[in-house]
Amino acid sequence: MNTNINYNLFYIFMPKIINNREECIECGLCWTTCPSYWERDGEDGRAKLRSVSLDKYEDGVYVLELSELGCNKDFQCPTNAIKVEE
Ligand code: SF4
């Protein structure tokens, strides 16, 4: 019996959050529904991931892989500035 675990497959199937800040209309749904992940940036008013500094975003986009989506399942961004892939 082969007991080796292919950890690459584990990462392929991890859910992802894709945040494209250019698409944000500052409605506040994400940071009010899921404040443990999202906050309003004080400079431009758009949503950002609480745990990620803006200089980690590439061209306004950041992809975060998670083991669980948590409260990110509890809202749907109206402009797809936040997309969830499961
Ligand atoms: S829900 Fe979407 S549009 Fe509204 S503040 Fe969050 S990222 Fe921006």
Image (spheres, rainbow, N blue to C red):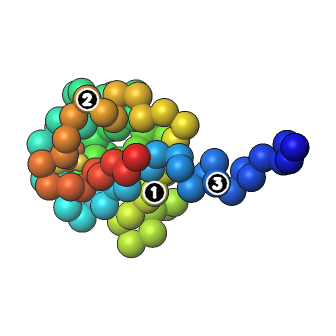
Query: Can the viewer see residue 12?
Result: yes
Q: Which residue: 53% across, 46% down?
A: 14
Q: Position of residue 56 (x, y in %)?
A: 51, 60
Amino acid at the residue labelled 3: Leu
The residue under label 3 is: 9
Q: Which residue: 42% across, 35% down?
A: 69
Residue contact at pointers 3 and 2, CB within 8 angstroms: no
Relative vertical location of residue 73 with respect to residue 49 in this rendering, above or below: above
Q: Quadrant of the N terminus?
A: top right
Relative vertical location of residue 57 with respect to residue 45 in this rendering, above or below: below
The residue under label 1 is: 63
Mark found first going from the N terminus, 3 or 2: 3
Label 2: element kind:
helix
Please state which of residues 85 and 38 is positioned toward the viewer in this rendering: 85
Mark found first going from the N terminus, 2 or 1: 1
Q: Position of residue 73 (x, y in %)?
A: 30, 33
